[in-house]
Amino acid sequence: MLTRRTFVQTVGVGAAGALTGSWIGARGREAGIWDLASSLDAAQATQVIPLSSNENPLGPGKVVLDAVQRAFGPAGATPGRYSSATGELRDALSKYLNVRPENLTLGCGSTQILRTATHVYTERTKALVGTIPTYEESAGYAAMLGRPVRAVALDRDFRMDLDKLADASRGAGMVFYCNPNNPVATYVGAQATRDFIARVHRISPETTILVDEAYFEYVTHADHATMIPVALEDPRVVVARTFSKAYGMAGMRLGFAVGHPDAIRKMSEWDSGSGTSSLNVLALHAGIAAIGQGTAFVDAERARNKAVRDFTVKWFADRGMKSTDSHTNFIFVNTGVPARQFRDGCAAKGVRVGRDFPPFENAWCRISLGTMEEMQRAVVVFGEVLGKAGVVAAA
Amino acid sequence: MSVTRRGLLTMFGASGAGPWGGSVDGLALAARGLEAETAESWQAGGRRGGTPAAGADPQPSIKLSSNENPMGPGKAVLDAIVGQFGEAGRYPFNSTPGEGKLIETIASLHKVKTNNVVLGAGSQEILKTAVWAFTNPSRHLVTASPTFENATNVARRMGHPVVEFNVDGQFRIDLEAMLTAVRGAGLVFVNNPNNPTATVHGGKTIADFVERVRRISPDTVILIDEAYHEYVTDPAYETAMPIALSTPNVFVARTFSKAHGMAGMRIGYAVGSTDTIKPLERFRMPFSISVFGVVAAIAALTDPKHIEAERARNTEVRTFTQKALEELGCRCTASQTNFLFANVGRTAAEFRTACAGQGIQVGRDFPPFQGSHARISLGTMEEMRKATAVFRDVLRPANAAGGGIV
């Protein structure tokens, strides 16, 4: 078995294959630095399966890591230079997405994109609108700035409730539209999204819609399309993307926004760090290599993830536990027990699952998808924790 | 972030009052990092001019314009990065070692507690969040001119007032002058050593300045940016860390971009009392340091001999280059850094263009001295031998015509 630890020694000599997690921490996405400072070394040696942060369990792969190593430069001195590769990455991305470089701005993860968009598109009198729950970065940042935040409940299928969302958008600065939506995993089809955008702009012509497509590559919906073409034409629509999910580069901190040149300019003018001062040189070269793998890489990763997702959803369904309709690399499942109880039970057996997601923390848990092998081991733990190891409902 | 995502759910729907007020609305003006911009424009030139090495940032010429360490980070650091390849897919809060380990390493190096340390994507993030956190339209920034412009630019972009004081006759930050403007200030920025003038103030001078600022304006925060700390050889210099730890409203910024040779990795940090630096933690972008950056910085800090050797290497190159320039009649300020600020007797633009024509890239304009001074970053000894030959060529005709440079 190739652990991440041993991987280190084999990389560069052509090692391939799945990496298993030798992960130590139980850190939610929301963990504060003060907490992080406590050492976690004790758990280091154990084979924990990390299913808590919606990462790609395979990491970025050899092509990307080779590019990182090449980025050291012939004398190993390149990391000592302020990076000059942002233009190169923008060029690669613009070719890949068939957009112009001025349609793109880079970010230190999509975190920087979300923060910047929230910063420039909301005001003290212009609220941020989003669903509850959703990915919290934009709303957390807006709250920190003292900008009002309006929360809208999901529909019964845990999809974004477009009627309620549109109503709430009236006079808003920005709608945060996370599609697929983290943590509930559901996806709103492309046509419904286009209609929603048009409707918001009829009701509230000045409202910007930030379409966060972090999980875009994992969607298997029949009506699946990016909103990039809409954003290119409409300065009130911005699409956020990340290399942290399907591309397996969460540790490298790289994301980007695509939009109309006016929208992109507004964002890059605000954040002096946008695209340059906060982006590390290795991530830039990794991003170029990742894009260079073309659609074949994404297709294979989507298929791999879907097989794992189907397996995991079925395992729960067979035991009477319903999941939402996942189009991501995680599932949101009704285990019937409080998330905390399930999480603690799993953690005690070496499997880390997602944090609480109010208002569903009493019965629902977010479980990120590992490798198939990891999930086969994880479901054994889930069965033990839930007391449903042997229970299989009739198919 | 103290408004954590956890805390958010309770705030969702409520309009929390943040410390920024409306002050950051409606801003404009582009401002990417100047060094990065310079790097990008050279890359564009390099791409036009030829084929850059695949994967590596192209270095079309000798780059003496951004105060980088020409040696890069060294083998221990690069090995640590490769050793972290297996964690590339994990968020920095999930990786082993995580950010927390880096904070612990920094804390133990400076013999402080982990809550005396805040990380940033380069010290630029520290400076940026300091301006966000401590200045506002009625609490100004006090700074020097010329100095590292990051804080100045961020404040201007936000519409927060900036009061600048020219450096003194010896190109040192004019602390006496700054004292006249500290009353009611939000933030005082002291870059020690000072970029681009390369000069340093001694420990006693800084301590005295801090004490006087505290007397005049106890609520004013003082940021002492020690980006070039590791390069200082003046025995009078002392880090302000002990002052920061014992004095409210004082903190020190450090970076891995200079002596540690990791400008491309984007890692810096602040050290101060917990209460003082907490706002930096709040405004900080979460997980802005990559998993590679975390291990790189840890590896760098656990190799103090490497830094000593780097200081010695730089000092030797500095002495050599300064001597060569002064032989050409170009007086340099008393450099305590990895760059020189030299009176080249003509506009920086003229000198820069002439050098660029011979493959040597030197620093940009630094008003108010753009008419006479150039900032020249120090490369390797080999690079500086080549560069000084070019300087000789470029400077000689003017010297002959102008009868020497004062």
Image (tube, rainbow, N blue to C red):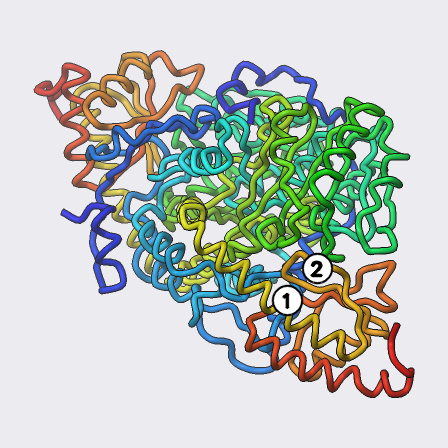
Residue B74's x, y, as percent?
A: 43, 60
Residue B387's x, y, as percent?
A: 65, 78
Chain assignment, label 2: B
User: In which quarter of the view is residue A296 placed?
Assistant: bottom left
The kind of residue tagged 1 is: Arg
Residue A51's x, y, as percent?
A: 29, 32
For the point 46% across and 35% down, which residue is it?
B103
Residue holding disc 2: B335
Residue holding disc 1: B318
The residue tagged with tag 1: helix, strand or loop?
Answer: helix
Nearest the eye: B80 or A123: B80
For the point 69% across and 22% down, which residue is it?
B18
Left or right: where A168 falls relative to A134: right
Residue B142's x, y, as percent?
A: 82, 38
- Check whether the beta carbons of the residues at disc 2 and disc 1 lie within 8 A of each other: yes
The answer to whether residue B318 of the structure is visible from this angle is yes
The answer to whether residue A324 of the structure is visible from this angle is no
The residue tagged with tag 2: helix, strand or loop?
Answer: loop
- Mark sitting earlier along the chain (2/1): 1
User: In which quarter of the view is residue B137 placed?
Assistant: top right
Instruction: Measure how far apart labels 2 and 1 are at the Cα level.
Output: 8 Å
Left or right: where A40 falls relative to B292: left
Would you call the spot at circle 1 few (<14 residues within 10 Å), some (14-19), or many (20 or more)?
many
The kind of residue tagged 2 is: Ser
Left or right: where B158 falls relative to B236: right
Nearest the eye: A65 or B387: B387
Residue B390 position (above or below residue A227): below
Answer yes or no: are tags 2 and 1 on the same subunit.
Answer: yes
For the point 38% across and 28% down, which residue is it?
A27
